[in-house]
Structure formats: C-alpha cells, structure tokens
Amino acid sequence: MTTTVLLCDDQELVRAGFRLILDLEDDLEVVGEAVDGRECLKLTAELAPDVVLMDVRMPRMDGIEATRRLVTAGSASRVLMLTTFDLDELVYAAMAAGASGFLLKDVPREQLVAALRLVARGEAVLAPVLTRRLIERFVAVPPPSVKLPDRLAGLSARELEVFGHLAQGRSNAEIAAALVLGDATVKTHVANILTKLGLRDRVQAVVLAYETGFLQPTGRYGDAGTVSPTRPR
C-alpha cells in the first residue's frame, strides 16, 4: 500500500532533498509541495495526503497554525513536523496543535522514512529524551495536587499504569515488557485510553500528562503530589 506525502517547506532545496529521498521508496509517493502553511491547507484539501511533512518556521502561515487548522477542520492527513533546532520552543506548540510527531531536519534518511510509515499507520513519532526536555522547559507544571487529575478519573487502574508509560514516550513493545503484558493487550489499552481522553494520538497523551501534573519533568509520575497510577488516593 502506497503512503502519499505532501512536502511543506519554504526552502526549495529542502523540498527537493526530501523528494529525492522519498522517491527511492516504493511505498512512499510525494503528491505535492507547498511553500507555506496557506498553500499547505489548500493542497491538503485537494490531494488528501496520508502525511504532511511540515516545517515549523515558514512565512505567511507557519507550520503550527497550519497544523492547528488541519486538525480543527477534521483532516485525516497526519502531520509530521520538522524543525532545525532540538530545543525550538515552537515544537511543544506543534505537539499541542495536533502534530503526530517531530523530527530534526538533519535526521538520517532511514529514520525519516520509518517515521513517515509510522505516522501513516496512525502512530506517533516521539523522541523521549527530546520530548522531556521540551516539556520541562516550556510547559508550566501545575501546582501540587493530592488527587488524580479529573481528566484522568475515568481510566482504570491498569489504564493509568499504561498511560504513565505511554506518557514517557515508550512504545507498545516497551510497555508490554515493563508490565508483562502481551503486545495486543497493550495496543487495546492504548486505544481505549486515547478514546476515553479524546486524544488524537500518543503525542497528545504526553502533552496531557504534563499539563495535568500526572507526569513531572523528572520523568516519573506522581512527583507533584499526584500518586502512582496503580494506587490513586
């Protein structure tokens, strides 16, 4: 099955480089190129690509606003965000806007191709260490709480446990190994968690975990007075 990709970057050489890389893959097809967020919205509506490879910084309309508008409009196209700097303050905003992941522009070819395939399948691309650094710096951690955040109250004890690992950027396989569960069981739990919380994907799960104080910048849940998800007070 072929995955269609729309390239959105204001630099022609960057777009050309990505096109050369993707043209080498039999299952990836570049269906269009946009020079800014406005053109991206127009072409996405016309071409309905599976994935939009979106630059963060662009003239007229940046990638964050374009992503926000795509998600708000209910577009089925997933957004994989690109950035030049690994501590760009805009990356967190891109995650919150609904991007399914982000990569640095100097990412190796193999990682770029793998990321596009993952995003096309409905998964998210998270770099756990980078994600944690971004959120530590740019998310205002809520004041300490002695109870589970209301937003998470509908999750079962097991789902809270899975959510804790999910929010740290771990894959289904890593969660399964940590909790001694089958991969299929973890996949079901993750799907249920996203549905119950009304989240688009795993990236938004990370954002929610930090915004509610469920997960603290140390990378451990429960540090701000919230408790271990297995034994809510």
Image: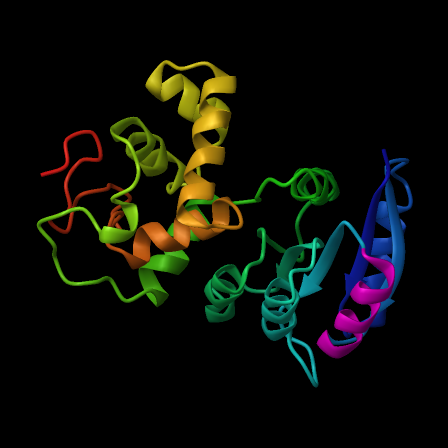
Residue shown at 49% from the left, 34% from the top: 191
In this view, which residue lies farthest toward the bottom? 60
Answer whether residue 223 is visible to the viewer in this image: yes
**Image: 84 above or below 180:** below
Residue 35 falls left or right of residue 209: right
- Of 9 and 189, the residue lying toward us: 189
Residue shown at 55% from the left, 64% from the top: 85
**Image: 42 above or below 123:** below
Residue shown at 33% from the left, 50% from the top: 209
Indicate yes or no whether the magenta region holds residue 201.
Answer: no
Quarter of the picture holding the N terminus: top right
The image quadrant that residue 169 belongs to is top left
Position in image of residue 187 (x %, y %): 50, 26
Quarter of the picture holding the C terminus: top left
Rendering colour mode:
rainbow
The image quadrant that residue 57 belongs to is bottom right
What is the number of callouts on the image? 0
Position in image of residue 52 (x %, y %): 73, 57
**Image: 195 above or below 97:** above
Residue 5 falls left or right of residue 98: right
- Of 197 and 216, the residue lying toward us: 197
**Image: 157 above or below 94:** above
- The secondary structure making up most of the magenta span is helix
Magenta-drawn segment: 37-48
Answer whether residue 14 is visible to the viewer in this image: no
- Of 168 and 87, the residue lying toward us: 168
Position in image of residue 2 (x %, y %): 86, 38
